[in-house]
Image (tube, helix red, strand yellow):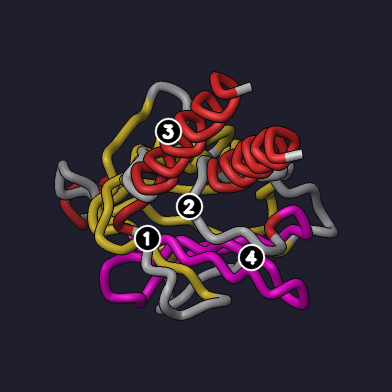
Amino acid sequence: MMRLGWLALAAAAMMAATVGSAEATPATYTFSGVGAAYVCPSGDCDGATDVSGAFSFVITSDTSLVDTSGSPYFYLRNVDGTFTSGSYSATLTNVTLEANSDPSFENVDFYDHDFLNGLGLSDTALSGYNLLSSIGPITEPSPSGFLTPTFGGGSGFSTTAGDVLYFVSDDTLTFTANVPEPLTLSIVGAGLAGATLILRRKKK
C-alpha cells in the first residue's frame, strides 16, 4: 500500500509538471478549403497569378504566445503561416489568429498585421475553443458556414517573397470542421483525480 501511495504522488508530480509545460507546447492550426484567390508579385497586380482551387493554411506556433486575457476572444499575434494551393506555396507574415469561444458566435479569423484584411469562419465545434491546442483541418460546408468576404477592399496577406495573397470572394469557399484536439489540461485533470482516488483508498 505504501508503494501505491508513492506511485500516486509521483504520478501527480509528473502531471503537475506537464501542466506547466503544456502552456509552452507547440500547436498547429490547419485550415483547408476550396476558393478563389490570386497572388500579386511584389504588390504588382498586373502580373497576378491565379491560385484558385483547393488550398490550405498551416500555422504552427507556441501556445505560450496565445493571449487569453480577452476571453472569450483569444489571439495569436505576429506569427508566420504557410499557404499552399496546387503547386504554389508561400509563407505568410505577421498573421494574427483570433478565436471567439462565445457559443452565440464561435469563430476563428485570420487577420493581416494591420487588421485591414481578414478571412473568418464559424462552426459550433469551436465553442469554448481558445487556441491552446492544435486544431484542424477546419473546413466549413456551405451554406451553414460563415466566411467574411473581404475587409479593406481585399483579404490580403503579405508573404516572405514580397507578394500579396488576395482572396477574391467567399462564394466558392467550402469548409468542414473537426472538433479541436482535447486540451492536455483535461487529460492531466483526469490523471490527478485517479491519483487522489488511490490515496483515499490507502487511507481507508
Counting other residues with Cα less than 10 Å from the Cα at mark 2, is it few (<14), some (14-19), or many (20 or more)?
many
Residue 115 in magenta stretch? yes
> Between residues 200 and 157, which one lies in front from this camera angle?
200
| Residues under numbered marks 1 and 2 in contact, where contact means CB atoms less than 8 Å apart | yes
User: Between marks 3 and 1, how big is the CA–CA gap?
Assistant: 24 Å
Tag nearer the camera, 2 or 4: 2
Residue ID for mark 4: 107
Residue 130 in magenta stretch? no
Residue ID for mark 1: 66
Would residue 86 appear left or right of 183 to someone viewing this image? left
User: Between marks 1 and 4, how big is the CA–CA gap?
Assistant: 16 Å
Query: Which quadrant of the figure contains the C terminus?
Result: top right
Tag nearer the camera, 3 or 2: 3
Whole-percent x, y for residue 196 in the image: 65, 43
Residue 106, numbered circle: none
User: Between marks 3 and 4, how big is the CA–CA gap?
Assistant: 34 Å
User: Between marks 1 and 2, how big is the CA–CA gap?
Assistant: 7 Å
Residue ID for mark 3: 14
* Region of the chain picked out in magenta, as a range: 96-125
Whole-percent x, y for residue 5 in the image: 57, 29
Q: Earlier in the sequence, mark 1 or mark 4?
A: 1
Q: In the displayed structure, would residue 61 be above or below residue 79?
A: above
